[in-house]
Amino acid sequence: MSTAYKNRIQEFKLALSEENIKLKTLRELCFNGIPFEGGIRALCWKILLNYLPLDQTLWESFLKKQREVYSQFLKEMIIQPGIAKANMSFSREDVTMEDHPLNPNPDSRWNTYFKDNEILLQIDKDVRRLYPDMAFFQRPTEYPCQLILDPQNDYETLRRRVEQTTLKAQTVNCNRSGVTNVSSPGKALNLYPSNEYEVLPNGSEAHWEVVERILFIYAKLNPGIAYVQGMNEIVGPIYYAFATDPNSQWKEHAEADTFFCFTNLMSENRDNFIKSLDDSQCGITYKMESVYSMLRDKDLVLYLKLEEQNIKPQYFTFRWLTLLLSQEFLLPDVLRIWDTLFSDEDRFHFLVLVCCAMLILIRDKILVGDFTMNMRLLQDYPISDVHTILTKAKELQDSS
């Protein structure tokens, strides 16, 4: 470790040791990247994402309260409905009474259960594939949720719900001539072709299962947006940063802390996921067009080349902007980009600057490329050095 890096760690420790943290000083430090050592990154993100108050004397009581609130969410949205479902399945009287599985009433418990299952299956499919090039999300967490795994709670877990729902969908299927085949339950239980995605034995939880729970709770608490594909790519890096914290006192509560930080980030970013807002000033279309309008100001020749080839911003910036570049780079580089994004007061404007910088840095290739070559470049971005990209974005910001 170089002397300069050691000094940098000391600067962070000093800034974080103050009873009342100076946000402006912390932002300036974080903008150039946050060290992982000593859990500094995880702690800084909790402050930058407006989770932890700046007054450190409030932390202990605040965190205790937030983690209790999250436990309550687990009870109300996973455990209690799971117990009710177990009871509904066993009680024949329920079927003959007002509420039954075919009840079309939107207030029906069964109706809610089936709708939740649709969302859960989509989340399940997405989180199992989270960063497939890394083993981390498939590994067991050191701190499985005891509330969820408590053997005294006899209820239908999310894991069992996914298995049961997929099993029911797969055991009966029609072949192309319309003949219904009922496959054997053993065969149907192979929900995913690769052993890589098999669930862990009872009593253990993989990290992806924790992420699944966070997203399911978020969807239940935010029915207006629920779950949209891509949210898994935003919660994943936050959870990774918190669940790899070298300080076990923080790591133990990675799930609850991730939930609240993700919720805060989504409160700023959620309009990108709401289709009805796409064309409004807060929607994704406006943001995509703002990348091009900025490019027009900064590099007219490059802008005209993209226009001439009819390469529209939605062909590539949609993913860049909605997923905060999480799919364009390897996870360690995503964490580094997010250090800067989270520390900028106007973080989503800075993201537009980063997108613009990414275009300018490959201008020479774009100017000589045809439509196909350029689309390939933009959809599989060739530069992996995020330091160069962030430096260029800062230059663009300073010259504005």
Image (cartoon, helix red, strand yellow):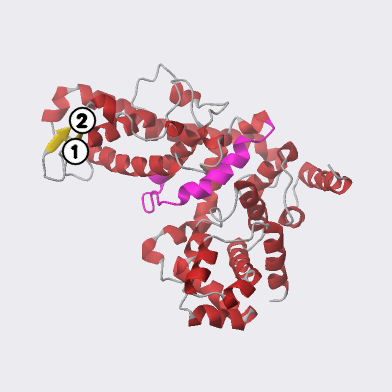
Asked if 370 appears above or below 265 in the picture, the reply is below
Would residue 53 be seen by someone viewing this image from the given angle?
no
Where residue 58 appears, x then y in whole percent?
A: 67, 39
Residue 173's disc number: 1
In the rendered structure, are the residues bearing label 2 and label 1 in contact, judged by CB atoms less than 8 Å apart? yes
Q: Is residue 242 magenta?
A: yes
Task: Name the residue at the right extreme.
Answer: 3
- Residue segment shown in magenta: 219-247
Name the side, left or right, on which 202 lies relative to 257.
Answer: left
SS for callout 2:
loop
Task: Work out which quarter of the rendered image holds the C terminus and state it.
Answer: bottom right
Question: For residue 343, which quarter of the picture?
Answer: bottom right
Question: For residue 170, which quarter of the picture?
Answer: top left
Tell which circle, 2 or 1, labels the residue nearer the N-terminal end.
1
Would residue 39 be seen by someone viewing this image from the given angle?
yes
Residue tagged by mark 2?
183
Near mark 1 (Cα within 10 A), the count class, few <14, some 14-19 or many ≥20, is: some
Asked if 285 appears above or below 207 in the picture, the reply is below
Asked if 37 appears above or below 318 in the picture, the reply is above
Residue 138's disc number: none
Name the side, left or right, on which 356 lies relative to 263.
Answer: right
